[in-house]
Each structure stands twice: as C-alpha cells, then as structure tokens.
Image (spheres, rainbow, N blue to C red):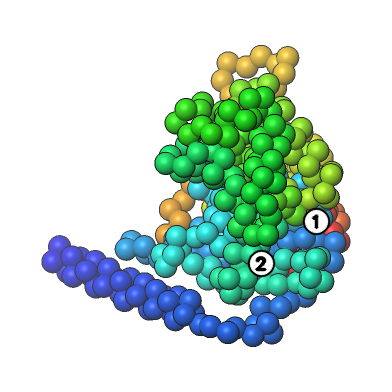
Amino acid sequence: MAENNKTKKQRLKDIKKFNNQMYNEYEKNKRKKNIPESEYLTTMSDKENLIEFDELKTYFYTDSGTVKAVDGVTFGIPKGKTIGVVGESGCGKSVTSLSLMRLLQAPQGQIAGGQIRYNQAGKNRAVDLTKLPVKEMEKIRGNEIAMIFQEPMTTLNPVFTIGDQIDESIIRHNPKMDKKDVKARTIEMLKLVGIARAEGIYDSYPHELSGGMRQRVVIAMALSCDPQLIIADEPTTALDVTIQAQILDLLRDLKDKINASIMLITHDLGVVAEMADYVVVMYAGRIVEQGTAKEIFQEPMHPYTIGLMKSRPILNEETERLYSIPGNVPNPINLPPHCYFKNRCEKCIDKCSGAYPNLISVSPTHKVSCYLYGDKNSASVKNTKVGGKA
C-alpha cells in the first residue's frame, strides 16, 4: 500500500511538472511581439474552403493528467455551405469551435498541434488561426467569424442593457460608425431575429427577458457584422418548436444572402438533416465518419453513426423503447491505444484491438474510420474539404 501511495505521489508530481512546462511555454509564446506575417500566413489546400482544420489537437492540462479533448481532427468548411457536427456530449464538438475562435481557457486549455486555416477573401490571403497574433485575431473574432453560444443565460452581461451589448459588438468592428446608425443597426438585427418590440427590448436588461428571447438576442449579436462564418453551438436550445423553425430559416436566409458558411453544432439530428450540406460525426475527440447529409443519414457506415441513427424516434413507427448505445464514453485522460468505440461496438472484430483505424475514403465524399471497411480503398483525406476529392 505504501508503495502504491508513493507511486501515485510521484505520478502526480510528474504531471504537475509537465503542466508547469506547458504553462510556461504558453506564456512565453503569448508575450511574443511583432510577429512577422511569414509565421502565420499559409496556403489553403482547396480555395473553395473557407476553413480547414488540419490534424487539430486541443488538450487540457489538468492535475489528473492531459485531457485530449480534440485529437487530430481534419475537415473543411466550404464557402456558402453548412457543416453539421454531431456526437455525444464531451466528444469535442464545442472545443473544436472554441479552438477556431481562440477562446480556450488558457493556460490549462491549449492548441497542442495542427492548423486551422482561414481563407481571408477580403485580404486575398490565408492565415493559420492557431498562430495568429492576438490583435489580429480580435479583428476577425465577432466580425468575420461569429459564434452563437450555447447558453444564453450566461452569455449576456446582466448589468448592461441589450442595446449596449449589441452596440458594443458593432462599434468594436466599425469604430467610425455614427451612434445613431449603430442603434439603427442593432434594432434592425433584433427585428431580423423575430423580436417585434425591438425598440423596447433595446433598453431592457437580460433578466427582463425569457430564455428564448435571450437566445434570439445572442443570435442578433452574432449576426450584427455580417460574418463569413457563423458557428452555431446549439442555437435553438431554449426555443420552442415554432421559433426554432424561424431561427433556422433566418440562418439559411443569411447564409444565402452573404454567401456565409455555417458550422452547426447540435444533438438534434432532425436539425442537422434539415440544415446541413455535410455532416461530421465525432467520438471521443476524433472524427469517426463524415460525408454529405444524404450519405450519413441514408448510408451510415461506422457502428457509432449507425447507433445514433437507430436512437432516433421515427414518425409513424411504434416502439416500446428507443435504442440506446451500450456502455460509456472512455476516460479522455487514459484513452486506449485501439479504437475508442471498441468496447461499445456490436460489430467488433479482432483487428479492432490493433492501432486506431485511419480515416479512409469509401466514396469521393464519404469517409469512415473503421476496420470493417478495410484499407484497400483507403486514400489520404488530409487537407481536403468534407465534400472534396480525397
């Protein structure tokens, strides 16, 4: 017992030492000034992509060990398209989006590797957001790339009015804009998201609004600068079915109006089926399957994706109990060396005990990470968009 306690203490000491090294390295990089463009300029693998995640790794350095929240994610977001990212809670969906926005809780949370390439059409260049200086990132965040956060109750500041908060977002990226024009723009955005009494809401505080109204205010704030990419993290969580349909229609209309792209993160497979052009299925920090919405919903291949589809209620079909995928998600600190879904998989084979399976192409747009489909048709999917050729 004494030996075990000694080993545990040594392990915790090693973890703390490693974490301190990572924290110091982060602070050192943060203090860098006058970073030359050559360090963050890059080249898009496909010019039709707005965003490209390339082997993105986002880790959290905790007292219990390193949490590999996102571990080697690669996919692209084409211009003017909607990408649906689905998976169980804790699979890395929101962390992927927060990595893109550079809003991780540092120094515990850090981008440990990979690239996030952003195609800045207005400046005719591509930049790696993981290496972009903070001041440059602040010009993009909320302006060219906006995020609709998951929890409207905590997104809004309780001591400022709704008008002040949306105005601030507009002024931050349009400092020369007249105050009257800023207010007019704010009221226009409030009306756009279905708030009829926009002038009255402008002077209201968050606590005076319902959850659904606050959700619409958050959406109005995100859309106020006509972003090229809208990250929607559960954008209709607090809304009833009627308002949910209106918000989804609004997002679609905006996307078509300014040729924006949408990264839609949700648990609602019905919303994904209605909104998404392409779907990315994540599990335990990795992509297990990706393809067009039609391929994922009509021809799911990975056992996990098949399980998700089986767990949906089907119209006009009676069932006593909905299907539930057996088992639990593995501990993100001590992930197994084999396929993370192996212990929950109903189609597991001997080969599944080997190295984690590569993401292989089964069609020009459909990719899956599973040994059931072998490696004979595999092709590199690195640096390609979801709907692009492998």
Q: Report the residue at 50% width, 48% height from top.
A: 90
Residue 165 in the figure: left or right of residue 261: left
Where disc 1 sits, the SS reads strand
Which residue is found at the position 68% from the left and 82% from the top?
37
Question: Residue 24, relative to residue 249: is it above or below?
Answer: below
Q: Which residue is at 81% across, 65% downward?
A: 121
Q: Please give left or right for residue 254 compared with residue 131 in the image.
A: right
> Where the C terminus falls, by quadrant?
bottom right
Name the spot of residue 360 as percent of width and height, x first: 75, 60
Note whether 114 is above or below 220 in the view shown. Answer: below
In contact (CB < 8 Å): disc 1 and disc 2: no
| Residue sitting nearer the eye, 363 or 90 | 90
Gap between marks 1 and 2, in whole Å?
A: 14 Å
Q: Tell me if I can see residue 262 in this picture.
A: yes
Q: Quadrant of the N terminus?
A: bottom left
Kindly tell me whether residue 73 is visible in this rendering. Answer: no
Amino acid at circle 2: Ile
Q: Position of residue 47 (x, y in %)?
A: 84, 66
Q: Residues within 10 Å of mark 1 (few under 14, many from 20)?
A: many
- 115 to the left or right of 342: right
Decide which of 91, 319 is in the foreground and name it.
Answer: 91
Give left or right: position of 221 versus 1. right
Tell me if mark 2 has few (under 14), some (14-19) or many (20+) residues whose alpha carbon lies within 10 angstroms of its own.
Answer: many
- Res. 116 mark: 2
Residue in front for this viewpoint, 204 or 273: 204
Task: Give the camera-side residue of 322 and 272.
Answer: 272
Percent across and percent down for residue 272 are 71, 37
| Residue beneath disc 1 | 78
